[in-house]
Amino acid sequence: MRFCHLAILLMASLLLGRARGETASAPIVFRPAYAPGPADNPMKGFVPYAGQGREFPHSLEFDYLPLAALMTGPTNFNWAPLERLLNDVSSRGCQAIFRIYMEYPRKPSGVPAFLVDAGVKVRTWTNTNTQPFPHAIDHTPDYEDPRLRAALKSFIAAFGARYDGDARIGYITAGLLGTWGEWHCYPHSEWFASKTVQTEVLDAYEAAFRKTPVLLRYPAGEVHHDHAPNSQRRMGYHDDSFAWATLETGRKSDDWFYLAALRAAGPAALNRWRTAPIGGEIRPELWPCLWTEAGCQEGQDFARSVAETHVTWLMESSTSKPQSPEERARAVAAARSLGYELQVVQATAALSGRTLDVSVTLTNRGVAPFYANWPVRLRAVDATGGEVAVTLPFRLNELMPAAADTQSGNLNLSSFPAGPIRLFLGISNPLPGGRPVGFANRNPDDSRLGWLSLGTMTIP
């Protein structure tokens, strides 16, 4: 009896649909052609200093800020310098990467004045580890001083409370400790923060930032000789000697090289790129030669370094200077090779009455996922300009290199007249005026910025 009842209901539904003129169309398959993704796709690529490199395609800009400019008392903060930086960078449609420091050779001390006035010791010395730049005066605080440690924890908590998830920020490098905020005081390693102090800073960052990615300079396992363990934390890493001290050499003297340090830190660190971004800086010695026809006589293979690290962004200042067309083309191709590259493989659309069922298949041709996981939107536009849209349930941060994913959604076209409709796919940037994600597809209709035209179909 139950089967007969269901059959009667199904037949009645079909007859009612036919009476209303609702028919199911044969699926239409769209296969947009491949084309390289934009070199200025958001949250990836080459990164100039803030305000520089405007002639080279980019979506991220970098700068340093002294802690002294942001913290004026144990619980008193001046966010104006950071606000100026973020607003300046975002005014160009870019997101910011920045690092807050207390010691930077050639610059005044970044230790907050109230700590110095309270008696926190600061060593002034000549740093010889400044290649390729001249030796310079450095200012190293006593990282073990309880007053400094309390200030760092207070600052990070307030920093995260105000800025975690801010759309103007792409990534934060942890900074605060060591020369240039790079978590070392070489050649005076004995002056660097103890593992206890490092752990306090790491704990504070993890508690304060749950949305905005924070990146660390050095991978460290449970028994690292200088650094507190971080391989089990959710933070990413940044290799600031990229293509110079990146690839493993097998030499004991090179065990600090990035990939050697990753391997020593264990499988969790080696696979960190799957869940957290990897960034860094191309070693300055390589800037003058990397994009020339002859290339650099020193350093390591750039393409292999990208492939093995799964790097998403790199600071690179040579692109801020005049380049020949050939050098520029090489640099643009290299910038494209970083991070994600999302291609629409195909989209299938089938009309059932006035409901359009659409499935979209994306593949990631890049070396890393898209960590921001912004929503993927499907939009239908009729001949009069009317629109309907739906969010497809992709999880871009889980779409690994060489993998593909298919997600579906449906659009209610009851408000559309009979006639042609156009289908578009887009990933919008949450930053107002920010660059949208460009797919690795040829776009036959670029009339809508940031939207890939999948094709046209007709509503009967």
Image (cartoon, rainbow, N blue to C red):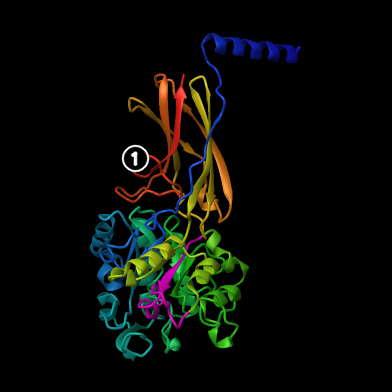
Residue neighbourhood size for the residue with mark 1, other residues' Cα within 10 Å, grouped as few (<14), some (14–19), many (≥20): few
In front of the other: 182 or 122: 182
Between 240 and 39, which is closer to the camera in this rendering?
A: 39
Residue 119 at x, y percent in the picture: 30, 83
Residue at 30% of width from left, 71% of height from top? 67
Q: Could you say where residue 68 lies in the image, as x and y percent from the top left?
A: 27, 73
Q: Main secondary structure of the magenta part?
A: loop
| Residue 64, placed above or below residue 394 | below
Relative image position of residue 117 (x, y in whole percent): 25, 80
| Quadrant in the rendering for residue 114 | bottom left
Q: How many marks?
A: 1
* Residue 359 in sight from this viewpoint: no
| Quarter of the image that includes the N terminus | top right
Q: Amino acid at mark 1?
A: Arg
- Spot occupied by residue 352 in the image (x, y as percentages of width and height): 54, 22
Q: Which residue is mark 1?
A: 448
For label 1, the SS is: loop
What residue span does the magenta drawing correspond to? Answer: 276-299
The one of 262 and 434 positioned closer to us in this rendering: 434
Q: Is residue 227 magenta?
A: no
Relative height, residue 298 to residue 418 (above, below): below
Instruction: Give the quadrant of residue 148.
Output: bottom left
Judged from this view, the residue extending furthest toward the right is: 1
Residue at the image point whose x is 51% and y is 52% from the top:
397
Q: Can you say whether 316 is above or below 374 in the image?
A: below
- The reply to whether residue 299 is visible in this rendering is yes
295 part of magenta stretch: yes
